[in-house]
Structures are given as C-alpha cells and as structure tokens.
C-alpha cells in the first residue's frame, strides 16, 4: 500500500511539472516588467525537433496576435545574422516583393516592405521601425528584433512583432516569433485569422531553410 501511495504521489508531481512547463508564447521577452522564467530552456514546453507550434491569441485588436515557437539546429549567431539582414528578406521570405533598410542608429533601422497579396487584394506597402539587441531570457543571453509600424507609412492598419532567439545549446537555437499584422482595407478580420497559422509556418520554415543553407555554404569543401 505504501509503495502504491508513493507511486501515485510521484505521478502527481510529474503531472504538475508538465502542467507548469513554460510556454515561450506566454512570455513577451524584452518587454519591461515582464516576469522571465529562471528554469533551463530544456524544461520548457517546446515542440519536437524540426516542428513549429503556432498559436493565435486575442490582443484586443480586429485580428489576433500569432506566435510561433520551435528550434533551429544552428548557433544563435547564425540565426541572428539571417534575421538581421532584413534587406535580403525579398530573396526568401514568403510574399515579400521588396525589402529595403535605412539605418537610424546602432541596432535600430527602418525596414520598408512590399507584400504580394492574393488577387483581388491590393499589394501592401509599409515601413516598420526595428530595434535589435541582446536581452535577458532567464535561460542565457538572448537576442531580439522588435518592430512597430510607422504610422502613415503605408496602406496597412497595423504591424508589430518580434523575433526572439534563445540558445538551447552551442548548436541549437530556440526561435519565438510574434506577429500582429492587420492589412486593413476590405479584408475581413476572420479571413486574416484563418490564413495566419499557415502563413506563420511558412515564414518560420523559410527562416530555417535560409539559416541551414547559409551554414552549408560556409562548410569547407572536402
């Protein structure tokens, strides 16, 4: 009886630990006043290797905010270099026709983009202000690019989000991608919400492919 009771207690403890595992999408890293977990990133609630988990949550706007999380088998610096080269987004990111960068100050730049929208929706043009730099994550030194829409710069209603990178190991990086984009116009909010999960996964897959391709090109020839 004692062993049985002990086994039940252990199971309850393990179940509680699973319930309390940190979901990176619940944390707005880099936001002032945000409580950051101190547990190892290996104990967080992460999707299996090679997979992305995407969620949509109410943000008090016409459309919901999306969040995608997963890992890339590459050092943080390699992932950061791809994200920080925003002028190259039109080479590999879905629907981006043009992407230009104008430096503002160290770690800050304006990113002008043109998005290819499906017929009959007009293409979207807009500028976001991007701020980049190191951040504390509770699981080691991380890096973040956070952006906000420059009001009046285009024909969208809103765009804000962030890329957050956290080292899992020397050769593996956790990626947390948050995005709230409202293209505005006559496009209904429910249509944006319906198509957003697939769009988020396409962006995350494009990032992973670009990072891994860049790394393979740097490998010395045999």
Image (spheres, rainbow, N blue to C red):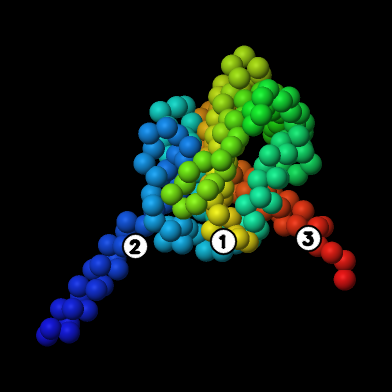
**Quick check: can you spot residue 6?**
yes
The picture places residue 122, in percent across and down from the top left corner, at: 70, 24
Q: CA distance from mark 2 to mark 3?
A: 36 Å
The picture places residue 23, in percent across and down from the top left corner, at: 41, 51
The picture places residue 198, in percent across and down from the top left corner, at: 59, 47
Earlier sequence position, callout 3 versus callout 1: 1
- Front one among 8 and 38: 38
- Front one among 167 and 54: 167
Task: Residue under label 2, please give it.
Answer: 18
Q: From the viewer's perspective, is 13 left or right of 89?
A: left
Above or below, 200 relative to 219:
above
Above or below, 90 relative to 7:
above
- Front one among 216 and 93: 216
Residue extending farthest to the left is 1
Q: Give the residue at x 52% y 63%.
A: 48
Quadrant that contains the N terminus: bottom left
Q: Residues within 10 Å of mark 1 (few under 14, many from 20)?
A: some
Residue 56's mark?
Answer: none
**Quick check: can you spot residue 94?**
no
Quadrant that contains the C terminus: bottom right
Q: Residues within 10 Å of mark 2 (few under 14, many from 20)?
A: few
- Front one among 132 and 65: 132
Earlier sequence position, callout 2 versus callout 3: 2
Q: From the viewer's perspective, is 11 left or right of 150?
A: left
Q: CA distance from mark 1 to mark 2?
A: 22 Å
Above or below, 174 relative to 8:
above
Contact check, label 1 and label 2, Cβ < 8 Å: no
Earlier sequence position, callout 1 versus callout 2: 2
Q: Give the residue at x 56% y 61%.
A: 169
Task: Residue under label 1, please give it.
Answer: 169
Q: Report the mark closest to the observer, 2 or 3.
A: 3
């Amino acid at each position: 009886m004692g062993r049985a009771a002990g086994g039940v207690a252990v199971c309850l403890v393990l179940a509680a630990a699973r319930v309390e595992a940190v979901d990176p999408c619940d944390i707005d890293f880099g936001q002032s006043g945000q409580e950051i977990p101190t547990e190892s990133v290996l104990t967080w609630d992460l999707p299996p290797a090679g997979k992305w988990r995407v969620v949509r949550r109410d943000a008090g706007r016409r459309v919901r905010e999306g969040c995608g999380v997963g890992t890339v088998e590459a050092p943080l610096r390699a992932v950061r270099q791809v994200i920080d080269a925003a002028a190259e987004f039109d080479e590999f990111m879905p629907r981006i026709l043009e992407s230009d960068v104008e430096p503002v100050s160290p770690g800050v730049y304006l990113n002008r983009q043109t998005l290819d929208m499906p017929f009959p929706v007009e293409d979207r043009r807009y500028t976001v202000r991007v701020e980049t730099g190191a951040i504390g994550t509770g699981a080691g030194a991380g890096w973040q690019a956070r952006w906000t829409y420059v009001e009046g710069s285009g024909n969208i209603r809103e765009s804000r989000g962030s890329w957050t990178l956290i080292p899992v190991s020397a050769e593996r990086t956790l990626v947390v991608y948050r995005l709230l984009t409202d293209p505005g116009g006559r496009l209904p909010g429910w249509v944006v919400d319906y198509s957003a999960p697939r769009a988020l996964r396409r962006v995350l897959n494009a990032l992973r492919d670009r990072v891994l391709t860049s790394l393979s090109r740097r490998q010395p020839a045999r």
